[in-house]
Amino acid sequence: MSAALVEGFSVTHSRYVPYAHAHYGGNLVDGAYSLGLFGDVATELCIRTDGDEGLFAGYSGVEFLAPLHAGDVVEVTATLTRIGNRSRSVAFEARVTCRANPDRGPSSADVLAEPLVITRATGTVVVPLPGG
């Protein structure tokens, strides 16, 4: 068992959202983008806690709270909330930390004073039994 296998352990990723990922008008990025990032951060969480990539079993709740735009920098965190024999409950949060500001210029962007929470979710991952 890993020393990281404790409730409250978390992993955070940060990523720039390229303009090629805009899916809708106004450079809006689809909500599935955040869910994909949650899968990535859950994989690292499982590696750090259980020494295995694990498998995502499903979401028990997803809230899309604010839009994600191309040109944003998004930070996603996975926090371990429950430890079962093979299952792990995980809380996810996606926050925009920087946002493009085209009014100032085509490549201008601002660091937000406070991160903007755009997506929250809860989910379950499963990992192999130790030694199995």
Image (spheres, helix red, strand yellow):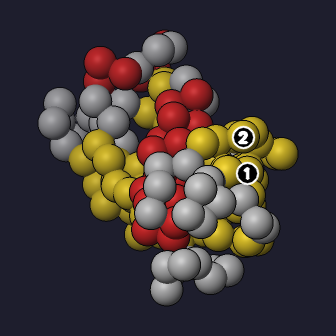
Q: Quadrant of the C terminus?
A: bottom right
Q: Residue placed at 32% from the left, 47% from the top?
A: 15
- Residue 99 relative to residue 91: left or right: left
Q: With respect to residue 118, does 19 lie above or below?
A: above
Q: Which residue is mark 1?
A: 124
* Label ID, residue 111: none
The x and y percentages for residue 33 are 50, 31
- Quarter placement of the N terminus: bottom right
Residue bearing the label numbered 2: 57
Q: Are marks 2 and 1 in contact (CB under 8 Å)?
A: yes
User: How dense is the environment of label 1, judged by Cα within 10 Å: few (below 14), some, or many (20 and up)?
Assistant: some
Farthest residue in the right direction?
60
Classify residue 45 as left or right of residue 61. left
Residue 28 pos. (x, y %): 49, 24
Q: Secondary structure at mark 1?
A: strand
Left or right: residue 22 compared with residue 65: left
Picture quadrant of residue 61: top right
Mark 1 is on which residue type?
Thr
Which of these two is toward me, 84 or 119?
84
Q: Nearer the viewer, residue 7 or 129?
A: 129
At 59% across and 66% down in the image, what residue appears? 130
Q: Amino acid at mark 2?
A: Ala
The answer to whether residue 44 is seen in the rendering is: yes
Question: Residue at the spot x=56%, y=63% of the render?
Answer: 131
